[in-house]
Amino acid sequence: MEYTHAGLAHAKSEGKTLGRLSKTSGEQRADILVKGAAGESTSALARMYEVSRANFLGS
């Protein structure tokens, strides 16, 4: 377990991104926020960007 924590700390110190990659780009996320604020439904946005509704519910 110590080696795992040491490896993760080393990767972070080198600026590597940890975890799962996002299914949407930063530009897409900004567009989603604008459309959501304009009244577009979560389900419609999820279909438009081909992701699950759960991707929006946490944000």
Image (cartoon, helix red, strand yellow):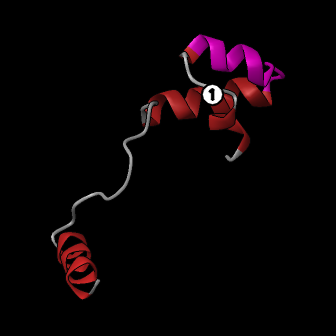
- Seen in the image, is 57 located left or right of residue 16? right
- Seen in the image, is 29 located left or right of residue 57? left
Disc 1 residue type? Ile
Magenta part mainly helix, strand or loop? helix
| Magenta-drawn segment | 38-48
> Is 40 drawn above or below residue 59 in the view shown?
above
Q: Nearer the viewer, residue 15 or 37?
A: 15
Image quadrant where residue 11 sits: bottom left
* Residue name at image x 54 percent, y 16 percent: 50
> Is 44 drawn above or below residue 2 in the view shown?
above
Image quadrant where residue 34 sits: top right
Image coordinates of residue 44 in percent, x first then y, are 73, 13
* Residue name at image x 68 percent, y 35 percent: 54
**Are there few (<14), some (14-19), or many (20+) residues within 10 Å of tag 1?**
many
**Quadrant of the image containing the N terminus:** bottom left
Residue found farthest to the bottom: 2
> Is 28 drawn above or below residue 17 in the view shown?
above
Q: Tell me if residue 43 is in the magenta stretch.
A: yes
Residue found farthest to the front: 1
- Seen in the image, is 6 located left or right of residue 37? left
Image coordinates of residue 9 in percent, x first then y, are 25, 79
Q: Secondary structure at mark 1?
A: helix
* Residue name at image x 37 percent, y 54 percent: 19
Q: Tell me if residue 23 is in the magenta stretch.
A: no
**Residue at label 1?**
32
Image coordinates of residue 15 in percent, x first then y, are 21, 66
- How many numbered marks are there? 1
* Residue name at image x 76 percent, y 24 percent: 42
